[in-house]
Amino acid sequence: MTAVQSPRTPTVAGPTVAGIRAAAEPILRRLGETAAARESARDYAFAEVRALAETRIALTGIAREDGGAGGSLRAVADLVIAIARADSSVAQALRSTFLTAYRVASRPDLPQRDLTLQRLRAGDLFAGTANERTGGASGQTNATARRSGADWIVDGEKYYSTGGLYASWFSTQARTEDGTVLRFTVPFDRAGIERLDDFDAVGQRLTASGTTRFTNAPVYGHEVTETEADEPDNPWQGSFAQLYLAAVEAGVAARAFDDAVTFVREKARPIKHSSASASVDDPYVRQTVGRIAAHAQAARAVVLLAAETLAGVHGLTGAQARAAGAAAAVEVAQAGVVAIESGLSAAELLFDVGGGSITDRGLGFDRHWRNARTVANHNPRQWKQAVAGAYHLTGAEPPTTGLF
């Protein structure tokens, strides 16, 4: 993530990328060791997520001058992969927090930037969504905001509130009586705001992605963020959101590799017709583990490469920013395709390194495919492939939303 220079906050001793990674490592180890059991029991990792927040993990990629840890966008992507390798649900639950940090790092003109920085430096976590389960068109806003003096009263429901059970702050939008879309950020503990644990997908079950309900909830005037009237030079602001999902897929592939190696070394037995006396020596098991490793490496490589390309867009203006933004958005989409297919393939191949015992539900290995599949369904890979093909063949720009 390109560090944005700011004269407002003097450089002081603070967090570093290396320090955050070192502090996070034992927490991630605990997450990895308990992930399967927690998913089976629907046991959220509140203590571990809070511990990660206290490392100021989201300050990775934010300039030291802003009180951040410094570091590149590649370092952020690498960190997300590491979190997802431990527990992909936790990685996705932190997505809104990292998206918030990315906007702070890449946009010096961000509304309420100093306030958001203050919250990030305090270790606060964020959630946010505009999604509604209303049966209307994608992106339709039916939540309402009515005037109450200088403030607003909001009613409605938002779904896919990823990370909501962990977060302190929630960003969303509602429609006013004159049809204007009002965007705002409010504390989760406010009266009239309710978090429901009703997310019930086949995978990513502990992402806390359920409903947030507003019932006569006050939104104060200073909590309303400005609406951008003009299209930015680089309108592909959603590219990092897509890169983040690709990083989660890369983490799933890496965890499938870890579990394959551990199972073969510690539990697997050669099949009756094997030429080996130990599974680690079976040529077909070796071939399968090597193939899983290749998928994990491919996913990681494309994510880190796309991160470097996306970082190169920062600081550009005008036509140069638009051209670079479009190219980066397409590269991120292509990385998403590779990461999705690598995650799914690695998770399926894991079962080929053992016999019937590897399907034991207590191991929870099926969660890797379910998690990879659920992340993949956020933004179908067919759309990513079609957008990339159109760009390469005709020069057609990709959609300016992140949803491809």
Image (tube, rainbow, N blue to C red):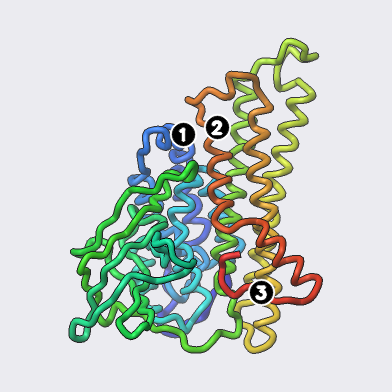
Residue 337 falls in image quadrant:
bottom right
Is 273 in front, or is 229?
229
Dot 1 and dot 2 residues touching (CB under 8 Å): yes
Q: Position of residue 302 (x, y in %)?
A: 70, 57
Q: CA distance from mark 1 to mark 2?
A: 8 Å
Residue at image mark 2: 365
Amino acid beneath label 1 = Ala
Residue at the extreme top? 272
Residue plotted at (57% across, 45% down) = 372
Please say whether residue 379 is visible from this viewpoint.
yes
Q: CA distance from mark 3 to mark 2?
A: 38 Å
**SS category of the residue bearing label 2:** loop
When the figure is inspected, residue 57 is found, relative to residue 121, above or below; the finding is above
Q: CA distance from mark 1 to mark 3?
A: 38 Å
Residue at image mark 1: 36
**SS category of the residue bearing label 1:** helix
Please say whether residue 123 is visible from this viewpoint.
no
Residue plotted at (56% across, 59% down) = 244
Amino acid beneath label 2 = Phe
Residue plotted at (75% across, 70% down) = 390
Q: Position of residue 83 (x, y in %)?
A: 51, 49
Residue plotted at (18% across, 85% down) = 149
Q: Quadrant of the N terminus?
A: bottom right
When the figure is inspected, residue 328 is found, relative to residue 35, above or below; the finding is below
| Sequence-first tag of 3 and 2 | 3
Residue at image mark 3: 312
